[in-house]
Amino acid sequence: MRLREFVDRLDSSGELIRIKTKVDTRFEISEITDRISKMEGGGKAILFENTESGYPVLMNMMGSDRRMALALGVTSLDDISARIDALLKGVMSPKNSMMDKLRMLPLLSDVAKWFPRKVSGRGECQQVVWRGEDADLNRLPILTSWGSDGGPFVTLPMVCTVDPESGIPNMGMYRMQQFDSHTTGMHWHRHKTGARHYDAYKRLGRRMPVSVAIGGDPSYVYSATAPMPDNMDEMLLAGMLRRKPVKLVKCLTNDIWVPADCDFVLEGWVDPMEDKVIEGPFGDHTGFYSLTDLYPRFHVEVITSRRDAIYPATIVGVPPMEDAYIAKATERIFLAPIRLAVQPEVRDLYMPIEGTAHNIALVSIAKRYEGQANKVAQGLWGAGQMMFNKYLVITAEDVDVRSARELFPLLRGIDPRRNLIFSEGILDVLDHATATTGYGSKLAIDLTDVEPATEGEELHMPDNVELCAGIKSLNAELFAELGLVMLFADSERRGVDVAAFLDNSGIKARYVVLFDHGAAEGMTHSDLLWIAAANTDPKRDITIHGGAVIIDAQSKRPGVGRNPKRFPNVVTSTMDVIEMVDKRWAEYGFEEFVVSPSRKYRTLLLSDKEDW
């Protein structure tokens, strides 16, 4: 399915907004998209038809459950999960008779049809060719999303590389900051396959060919983000999702093969012998800025495109956004492989939006023996992209991990000294709370044997609580359900003695979370969960006092004690951009005004800079 065909499908399904007014790729498109994508259910996809480049820009194309399913050609994502589950069961089940083996032939035949196919000649993505000085990145409508971003970023690039030792291709999604007309950054983290290929070329002392595909069938975009096993071709996954093979064409300047029907291709190279360059900051999917760091420079030699090309892009920032729905698809699609290859006792997996993919996960398991929850936690923390998980909640198989009604009584009933499992390991490089980039502590909560607590058990909230010691306000809305008390302390004051406050006040809570007063106060429960998960390192910021779990979710003073050296700002638009879009809102064709989400989240800003 070509991208333009997908746009038509969105339009006919009532899932598309067309904006004909001329818009700026610098901040304006992003601010409009942020407002729409945070509407209930993810809003709609937006096609900005009038940009300075002449190319339409498609935003929020997979930013809802329905659009995600449309992108992958199914009615429900559970259809894909069931298909994969049946396939894996068929392949892995014992074959005791010749008839059992013969029944596998149609299944294996279908699988063979999914493998990508190389075709001769040029593809639709090579109808227009720009070489040399004409291969100018300024021809493309590359977005600058947020006020403190280091520049324009290509946000949906499908970066194609080849392992020089094995010849196995990889397609990954690594953001690319545009530095000038012919170079970008290549933001592949140390844990990613692209970085491993880069290291291999460096060992060989050779320049690394790289091609970047943009657009085409939306299944390509999804597959490039999926947690595929190393050395497995992402285009095989795309073929399986769309039930037909991806046709590949050879690039003009290197031996890399790209989808023939994508919209743009950037061909070039990275020199591992060249000094890395400063990349960033970037308003990231964590809701905070990922700060500057050193990454390789990508040199563009040739740009090719379709004649009717559409430029797809996305923005990331404070959740929920489009990436949350992509992560939700991964959660459903990859449940069966996780059960088969990693933890067979896992029954369900849920990654709430507030966890921004890696910070929070909940799993239910079929428990048969003591210590099994610990085994599952350690196993998941060592498996693929689950290694980046920070907080993991493990329940018995009869618990609906998506239901607060079922989870809250269990969480309220824990024994903190018995049911908390602390560990250390790999974390996402974008995790800003840990003192060591990419490494920190983790926490699993074992609920498999916990009895649901009742409101009258053990916990107590006095009618009148005297605030002191820097604590400015208190929120006990979830005390009855969860035993949770939220405290809001003076943001200029650190080291509040929460334990002493609990003793003096007579509060007996199960969870006490400390936030910054004036910043986090007034946020929704969902917002506060996002802040708490993002701003904490479990071993540093969680203590146990009696039966209470005390969590310090305040922003951290950089470089103090075991704090990180830098602490980033939350991602928001600037007031100038917000007010400009406010004034132009009717021009875009919208009937109902939508308030900028940034107006709320700007209270969380630490300063006018990216870090302090």
Image (tube, grey):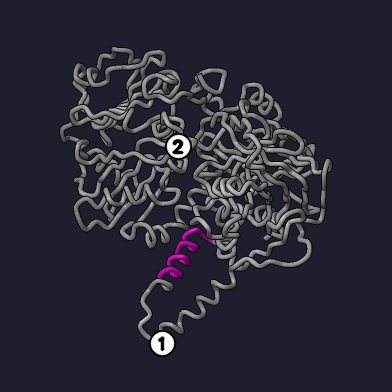
Is residue 566 within the magenta segment? no
Residue 242 in the image: x percent, y percent? 59, 64
> 159 or 53, which lies in front?
159
Residue at image location 34% in from the left, 18% down from the top: 473
Type of amino acid under label 1: Met
- Position in image of residue 524 (x %, y %): 43, 31
- Where residue 370 appears, as percent x and y from the top left, is 19, 52
Quarter-of-image position of residue 151: top right
- Indicate which label's residue lies in the foreground, 1 or 2: 2
Are there few (<14), some (14-19), or many (20+) residues within 10 Å of tag 1?
Answer: few
Determine whether the residue tagged by mark 2 lies in a helix, strand or loop.
loop
In the image, farthest residue toward the bottom: 98
- Most foreground residue, 172 or 571: 172
In this picture, residue 347 sits left or right of residue 219: left
Number of numbered callouts drawn: 2
Q: What residue sits right under mark 2 in the picture? A: 438
The kind of residue tagged 2 is: Gly
Task: Report which quarter residue 290 is drawn in.
Answer: top right
Residue 256's spot in the image, x, y percent? Answer: 68, 56
Residue 354 to residue 366: above or below = above
Q: Is residue 504 visible?
A: yes
Q: Which residues are magenta?
A: 75-89
Q: Is residue 521 visible?
A: no
Instruction: Specify the principal SS of the magenta part.
Output: helix
Q: Crowding near pointer 2: few (<14 within 10 Å), some, many (20+)?
A: some
Q: Earlier in the sequence, mark 1 or mark 2?
A: 1
Could you tell me which residue is drawn at 55 percent across and 74 percent down? 110
Rounded to the nearest whole Å, what is the CA distance between mark 1 and mark 2? Answer: 51 Å
Label drawn at residue 98: 1
Report the residue at 38% width, 62% height from top: 340
SS under mark 1: helix
